[in-house]
Image (tube, helix red, strand yellow):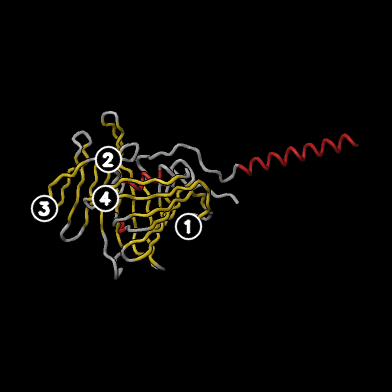
Amino acid sequence: MKNTFVLFILIFISNSFIVFTQQSNINKISTAPKKIEVGEDITYVVKYLMFEIGEVRLKVTNKEISGKDTIYTAIAYINSYKGIPFVDLHQIYETKFDTKEISYYFKGTVLSSDTTYTIYEFDRSKKIIHILQGREGIHPKIWTDSTAIYNHNYVDGLSIFYFARMRTGHKKTVTVPCFLNEHYEKTYINFYNEVEDKSIDAVDYDIACVYLDGSTEFKGIFGLTGYFEGWFSNDSRAIPIIAKMQVIIGNITLELKDWNKKKWMPPKFID
């Protein structure tokens, strides 16, 4: 009887240790290498106060080898909903960047009856940034054709989004050189290494996320200016789940609404 009791205690302790070990591994920071996948297609609803005012759709459309570099192409479509009284926004942004998210090319297009564009071509070999600005349509016109000195590796207004994603989950603060609005700018980002739970309308469970915040000293795409926060999936994809930012009209929230569900699902936060 005594031996049976001792055996029971040992089994209980062993099982408790296994359970404790399993629980201690729950919601730890993902150590899987971050990756960008061609075909990624994610859509966000933009909320201002209690109103849904538009959508942002982000697509990774191409991957190519150029010399020793791998170059990704990504496109952002930004559209306000029809009938919103205080905003009418229709823009397309395209970026090409390498595996460190350093920009090779950027184009921003503002769609309207008089569609305009801005293009930056980053020529590292010649140490210049070629700047083109003009109008598309029936009466195309170029009004800016100039260069700036390429004296640093820069991200652009869209590639910085991927730059941040690929560095989530590591506690550090970085200063990111940016080139936009035809100026050399900086973005400050604080990364954290704790897992948090966030909920969105698109799934019926809490999502395991990692957090970052930061600030800009300029007006970026989406109208971003000043302080921002972001929660990203705690996995190799680092998909943005929720973002909060200051823009011209005030504070807005971007919430993940739709994605390629056959390729990825948000990681579940375990209580």
Above or below residue 100? Residue 200 is below
- Circle 1 is placed at which residue position? 200
Badge 2: residue crowd in 10 Å (few <14, some 14–19, many ≥20)? few
Q: Residue at x 81, y 39 (%)?
A: 9
Q: Label 1 sits on what residue type? A: Ile
- Which numbered dot is residue 93? 4
- Label 3, label 2: how far apart the Cα atoms are: 26 Å
Q: Residue at x 14, y 52 (%)?
A: 134
Mark found first going from the N terminus, 3 or 1: 3
- Which numbered dot is residue 67? none
- Circle 3 is placed at which residue position? 143
Q: Position of residue 11 (x, y in %)?
A: 77, 37
Horizontal side of 223 relative to 13 (left or right) equals: left
- Label 2, label 4: how far apart the Cα atoms are: 22 Å
Residue extending furthest toward the bottom: 85
Q: Position of residue 217 (x, y in %)?
A: 31, 55
